[in-house]
Image (cartoon, grey):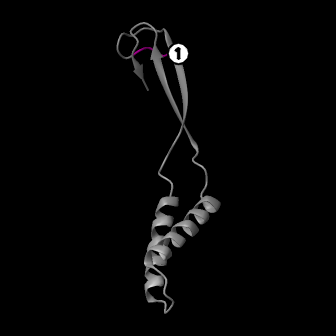
Amino acid sequence: MSINCPYCFSEQIVQVVNQQVGGPASTGIATSASLATIGATLSKSLPLPLSPMLGGLAGAVIGGLFGSMFDEPPKPAVLTYFHCNHCQQNFR
């Protein structure tokens, strides 16, 4: 069974497979930001004279380390479509 182009009905069709690395945004940034907020809040409530900025920085560093250790790398997305060599249109 041959595939015909839906635009020009030609049989000069090739299948194209592209791999793209991507996907949803990494959660490492959210982890860093939330731990920075927690660190700043904790440094305010501690009786030690720690600056909230220092607590936020420590929380961001710890969040970044946790994010890099536990986040999975993005999986490549495979895009498959057809290309007509006659009319140069792409379709699925």
Q: Which region shows up in magenta?
A: 1-5
Where is residue 77, by image quadrant? top right
| Quadrant of the frame with the N terminus | top right
Whether 69 is drawn above or below 85: the answer is below
Residue 13 in the image, given as x and y percentages of width and height: 49, 13
Residue 90 in the image, given as x and y percentages of width and height: 41, 20
Q: Nearer the viewer, residue 14 or 52?
A: 52
Left or right of 20: which side holds 89? left
Q: Nearer the viewer, residue 31 or 47?
A: 47
In terms of secondary structure, what is the magenta stretch mainly?
loop
Name the residue located 46 percent from the left edge and 63 percent from the top edge.
30
Left or right of 87: which side holds 49? right
Residue wearing tag 1: 14
Name the residue located 34 percent from the left edge and 14 percent from the top edge.
7
Whether 60 is drawn above or below 92: the answer is below
Where is residue 61, by image quadrant? bottom right
What residue occupies the far left of the structure in this picture? 7
Residue 78 in the image, given as x and y percentages of width and height: 55, 35
Where is residue 63, by image quadrant? bottom right
Count of marks overlaid on the render: 1
Name the residue located 42 percent from the left edge and 6 percent from the top edge.
86
**Amino acid residing under circle 1:** Val
> Circle 1 — which element?
strand
Name the residue located 52 percent from the left edge and 72 percent from the top edge.
59
Asked if the stretch drawn in magenta spans residue 6, the answer is: no
Whether 75 is drawn above or below 36: the answer is above
Q: Nearer the viewer, residue 45 or 53?
A: 53
Whether 60 is drawn above or below 25: the answer is below
Left or right of 47: which side holds 75? right
What residue occupies the far right of the structure in this picture? 69
| Quadrant of the frame with the C terminus | top left
Around disc 1, counting alpha carbons within 10 Å, would you say few (fewer than 14), some (14 to 19), or many (20 or more)?
Answer: few
